[in-house]
Amino acid sequence: MKIKRQKIAKKTLSFYKYNFNFREPFQILIDGTFCQVALKNKIQIKEQMPKYLMGEVQLCTTNCALKELESLGKELVGAKIILQRYQVRKCHHLKSPVPASECLLSMLETTNPHHYFVATQDFKLTTGLKKIPGVPLLYIILNTIVLDKPSQSSLDQVQAAQLGELVSPAQQQNLHTMKEEQGIIKNADRRGKKRKRKPHNPNPLSCLKKKKKKGPTPPLKKIEPGQKRSRSRHKKHKIQGESHVALP
């Protein structure tokens, strides 16, 4: 079962690597809900996460996620201690903290430019994250860490990229003008255009006089039975001035 789970994770990772340019070390944003479930199931996140993803990882969180655990009281002290061990990434809510789900969504923006993985057990947060293309989701189920399959928004973006539908006509026009300014489009146009053929002199062989066609060959005479075939003999012409010398 473990080998099958890692094969599925490897396939999903290759999807994000080739289509969304994910590279090691993988950056994983973790919230308090994930740490709380890991604590209950005795999962060592620092040890198991690199093994499961088969690569180097960077575990990180935000200040808003830590503030949320502090506000929830003593029941989540253990999760807070675990979360404090990870790197704290700067968010835009230093002066006025917001719920962790809202903060993590803002960190990913609309295209996940920093290539974050998100580890959470919050259903509301996962629903919002699946609308953003290129966001790998991690959660805990049956005492194991699981990498979720690519969302429909990620699949749609990959399909659109393959069909060439990601660039709008206005953006294509802007790219065309930029290429013209840089002189790139001229070379491309030259390569694409067909060369016009220049007029050449006529072929000298075609100017030769046509040879006269030979007439039809006469039919062969039929030889009747008992009649000999007559052979045509060529007469020898004597060379002028040649004298015959008599032999002794």
Image: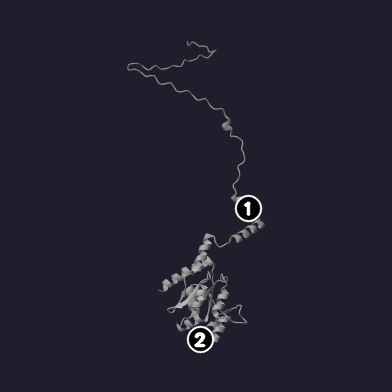
Q: Which residue is mark 2?
A: 78
Image location of residue 111, percent across then percent down: 56, 69
Q: Name the residue beneath numbered marker 1.
A: 187
- Compared with residue 202, is residue 112 higher up or lower down, i.e. above or below? below
Q: Gap in Å between the C-alphas at discs 1 and 2?
A: 64 Å
> Which residue is at 52% across, 73% downward?
129
Location of the N terminus (image quadrant): bottom left
Q: Is residue 125 visible?
A: yes
Does 63 sit left or right of 8 as displayed? right
Q: Residues within 10 Å of mark 2 (few under 14, many from 20)?
A: some
In this picture, residue 164 sits left or right of residue 232: right
Q: Position of residue 227 (x, y in %)?
A: 34, 16
Q: Residue at x 57, y 32 (%)?
A: 206
Residue in the image at 44% along x and 72% along y: 6
Residue 56 in sight: no
Element marked by disc 2: helix
- Disc 1 crowd rating (10 Å Cα; few below 14, some 14-19, many 20+) is few
Seen from the viewer's position, the closer of residues 218 and 77 is: 77
Q: Looking at the image, which is closer to me, 66 or 59? A: 66
**Residue 207 picture location, percent across and down:** 58, 30
Task: Tell me the kind of residue under disc 2.
Answer: Gly
Q: Earlier in the sequence, mark 1 or mark 2?
A: 2
SS type, badge 1: helix
| Residue 90 percent coordinates (x, y) | 60, 78
